[in-house]
Structures are given as C-alpha cells and as structure tokens.
Amino acid sequence: MVGPILASSVPNLAVKARLKFDRVREKHLLLLPEKVLVLNETAASILTLCDGCRTVHTITEKIRTSLQAGTEAMSTGSLPDLKMMEADISEFLREMEDQGWVVIHKHDTVDNNEQ
C-alpha cells in the first residue's frame, strides 16, 4: 500500500491525459487513450491546477480561495476547514494516480518560509 500524499507533493497530469472543455455539452473532459471522462466542476478545478509546479497544499489554498469568493458573493455558509479540504483533495488525487491519470512527485519536507 502506498502512503498518504504529502501536502508538499507536486501532482501533474499523466502524459497520456489531457483536459478539454466541451463547449457543446458545457462539460469538462479528461481525454485518455480510448477513454473520455466527464468531470464535475470540482474535479476539473483540481486537475486544471495539477501542472507539475503547484503543491497539493497550494492547490487546496487556490480552490479554497475560489470557494471563498463564491461564498462571499452568495452570502452563504462557511467554508470547510483547510486541512479537511487538503485531505479530500489528496484522496481524489490518490485515486487519479491509482488510475494512472495523474503523476505525483513526492517531497519529504516543506519550507514554510517559501511562498
């Protein structure tokens, strides 16, 4: 069994995977050899940020900031805890990695002074 994804890990799409927005259906797609996956907005938002440069923590912060802007615009409830979101996003990315659609480069340490 593979260990948990660290917040400092850097995910990116596998070479065989490509994101596309289908304008006719107004849906995000993940294109793979002999397979097309229709993504929901959350999955598309996460995978779009998997560019091989951003860490799982940075991706989580960006998603949370985006949700926060939407929440403020609608004046609705509070946001989930950052750590809870990070755990959910890590689980999603682990599933994508298990399918071979995402590659995760693991880093053992995080320098919190770098931003």
Image (cartoon, rainbow, N blue to C red):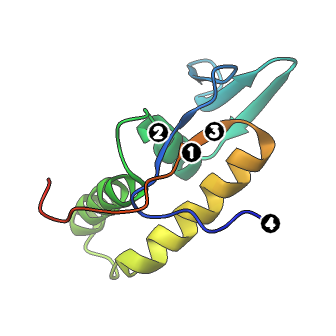
- Check disc 4 and give the amino acid type: Met
- Check disc 3 and give the amino acid type: Val
For disc 2, the marked residue is 50
- Check disc 2 and give the amino acid type: Cys
The correct choice, above or below, for 87 with respect to 44 in the image is below
Q: Earlier in the sequence, mark 4 or mark 3?
A: 4
Instruction: Rate crowding at label 2 as few (under 14), some (14 to 19) or many (20 or more) other CA atoms within 10 Å.
Output: many
The correct choice, above or below, for 38 with respect to 75 in the image is above
For the point 76% across and 33% down, the residue is: 37
Instruction: Rate crowding at label 3 as few (under 14), some (14 to 19) or many (20 or more) other CA atoms within 10 Å.
Output: many
Callout 3 touching callout 1 (CB < 8 Å): yes
Q: CA distance from mark 1 to mark 4?
A: 15 Å
For the point 48% across and 64% down, the residue is: 6
Q: Secondary structure at mark 3?
A: strand
Q: Depth check: give the residue in front, 100 or 110.
A: 110
For disc 3, the marked residue is 102
